[in-house]
Amino acid sequence: MLILGIETTCDETACAIVRDGHEILANVVSSQIDLHSEYGGVVPELACRRHVDILLPLINEALEVAKLTFKEIDLIAVAHGPGLIGALLVGLTGAKALSLALGIPYIGINHIEAHLYAAMMNTLNGQTSTQSLFPAIGAVLSGGHTSLVLIRDIGHYELIGQTIDDAVGEAFDKVAKILELPYPGGPEIEKLARLGDHKKYPFKPGVVKNSPFDFSFSGLKTAVLYTVKGQNAETEKEISRECIAASFQNAAFKDIISKTLKAAEAYGCQNIVFGGGVTNNRHLREMFLKTNSNFNYIWPDHALTMDNAAMIAGLGFHQFLANPKGDSLELEALTSIPF
Ligand code: KG4
Ligand code: ZN
């Protein structure tokens, strides 16, 4: 089954063609970093306009890369949330129009669920039965979400913890701004942190009372702000941006690691599946490995950590097996979708 995936939830326009849920024939991404970097964050209206301009040329590019024509596509899978409403509408409307014009079904995909599927894509390698992987703990670490999810099977999830304020990627982006690093901040912090001592600043992430699997990163971000500019500010000579980056990164990741491992233990899961842009961070992967735990870590390929449409098309295959009619034209774009 050949599936065209479309992703326009935020600031990347992405199209992919995936066979049977795992074989990637094309995966093209048009980043909008150039458009938003001067503002230090995503400007929704600019994002929407760029999606409108780029979506159809990008679909044609994906078909060219895969050496296919529209006639050979069996299904369209599109991210219909969560994300920026205008941005979502571009992809969803495009998918509905193509579905009507080509006379093929389309299916709406949860972007967050797709981030987790990105890691499973290789591991499943074409098997439609996924029983060997589950139950698993899913850790979604992105710019918009930080969640721990019990995965019973593809399509069957239970939210067990989430951030009560900033997402971890958002905290990276905000700390990068404080340190006057370019947008997006995550990769910049990772680079800078390599040069610093993570023990220099005793930063701590928030503890959420009576919710052992919830996260809070806004206090951590504020502690960085005070260290650089505010009430705890050291003299300019004494501040080490490298050590601040390393100490912040270490505090955030230690918290994520401890809660993820505790969740895996509490729910009796052998496998931990990771998804989202922050899992691109090599130091995070090393820190998990250094815990020497017996859990099996399932990471997405680096090329599939950031927003992409291969994960959307891949998950579309499994969702279509469960819902072979596809979605109706009534399906709405959703800025948030609860697990
Ligand atoms: O999953 P994603 O592409 O978009 C969302 O769905 O949010 O994640 C983007 C987020 C941004 O906050 C970015 O700063 C962060 O992922 N990120 C990183 C790294 N690469 C991207 N954070 C830490 N280290 C990285 N290497
Ligand atoms: Zn994402």
Image (cartoon, rainbow, N blue to C red):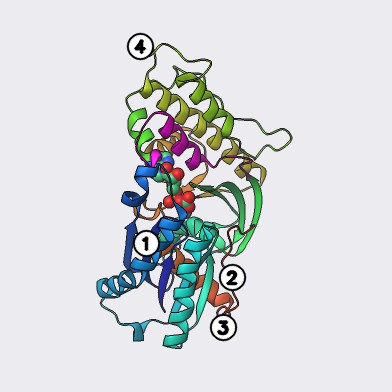
Mark 3, residue position: 325
Image location (x, y in percent) of residue 290: 44, 33
- At 32% from the left and 25% from the top, the residue drawn is 195
Snapshot quadrant of residue 124: bottom left
The reply to whether residue 296 is in sight is yes
Is disc 1 placed on a helix, strand or loop? helix
Mark 4 surroundings: few (<14), some (14-19) or many (≥20) residues within 10 A: few
Quadrant for the C terminus in the image: bottom right
Give me the C-alpha separation between circle 1 and circle 4.
43 Å
First in sequence, mark 3 or 1: give its number.
Answer: 1
Identify the disc placed on residue 50. 1
At label 2, the amino acid type is Glu
Report the mark closest to the observer, 3 or 2. 2
User: Which residues make up the magenta segment?
Assistant: 162-186
**Number of callouts in the render?**
4
Q: CA distance from mark 3 to mark 2?
A: 17 Å
Instruction: Kindly identify the residue that appears in the image at 50 percent across and 64 percent down.
Output: 88
CB contact under 8 Å: marks 2 and 4: no
Residue 276 visible? The answer is no
